[in-house]
Image (tube, grey):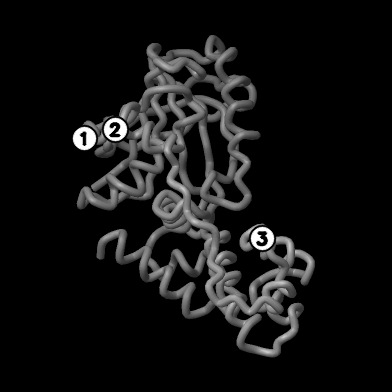
Amino acid sequence: MDYAKQIQRGIDYIEANLDFDIELAKVSKLAGISHWHFQRIFKAVTGETLKTYVRSRRLANSLDALLTTDAGILEISIRAGFESQEAFTRAFKRAFDLTPNAYRKLGDKSLFLKKVQFDTAYLRHINANVSLQPEIETQPPMTLVGLATQFYSVDSEKNNIGDQLPQLWERFVPRLGEIADTVPGVCYGLVQQVREDSALLQYHAAIEVTRVGELPADMVSVEVPGATYARFCHGGPAKSIDRTVNYIYSTWLAQSGRRHTYAADLEIYGRAFHPTAEDSVMYYAIPIY
């Protein structure tokens, strides 16, 4: 089964269960994809997190309920997955520029969700700053030493990547000299799931070592098994890396005939990298089979 069919299986489950509680981890399980990778691909393809998609579909269903049933707005709010009528009203007004009560009085069946806008910055990015076809490389096993944290990515409603990762690198880079037996010139960001059914991710800011000696305070070592990687070049500031990852997951991976192994993704930072420079170059690699 290809990724498109698996994502569609998840969407079909959502559509069939909009009036019931939907456990997001169950959606990805039924699709046959790990939870983070389902959310990653889903966000890249639709531009929405899985949770916001479910909520927007329930909002769309609430339009029909307001016009064709006598259900109270509180009841419709709860069925749409909102904790209160007030929260439902705020979300409804953001989506439709009307309150639910005003819409019911208007009786306009032609009201739709706001028009989707193309992300022109993303289109410019993939045309200028991403290698659309990756280098397929065999990476030998590595031992890395560095600092670790856990975070939620941009594909999650709990996204805290901006709080966690820049601070981790700010703490790690000044301490490179404390690590013995390093392979100089390249640092790695290691991104992997904590569990297959969780959107929580583990991240290491690290450098390769030839052997593990006494570890500096707060640092850990991690073994990266040898694997085949699709390695993409990313040009421009580090803050735009999510656009490159979106392209990888939504376009290249879906069309490549390859599968993600669910092992760790690698961010690769060499001498051509600068965190804010427009001419910066780094690489993002995903393990494949």
Q: Name which residue lies at 58% across and 72% down.
A: 58
Q: Name which residue lies at 53% across and 73% down.
A: 110
Query: Which is closer to the viewer, label 2 or label 3?
Result: 3
Q: Position of residue 199 (x, y in %)?
A: 53, 53
**Of marks 2 and 1, which one's residue comes earlier in the chain?**
1
Circle 2 packing at 10 Å, graded few (<14), some (14-19), many (20+), is many
Q: Which mark is residue 149?
A: none
Q: Position of residue 145 (x, y in %)?
A: 49, 25
| Of the pair 231 and 20, the residue shown nearer to us | 20
User: Does the residue at mark 2 contact the one at mark 3 (Cβ under 8 Å)?
Assistant: no
Instruction: Give the residue at mark 1.
Output: 136
Q: Secondary structure at mark 3?
A: loop
Circle 3 packing at 10 Å, graded few (<14), some (14-19), many (20+), is some
Instruction: Give the residue at mark 3.
Output: 97
Horizontally, residue 202 falls left or right of residue 87, namely left
User: Does the residue at mark 2 contact the one at mark 1 (Cβ under 8 Å)?
Assistant: yes
Instruction: Give the residue at mark 2.
Output: 231
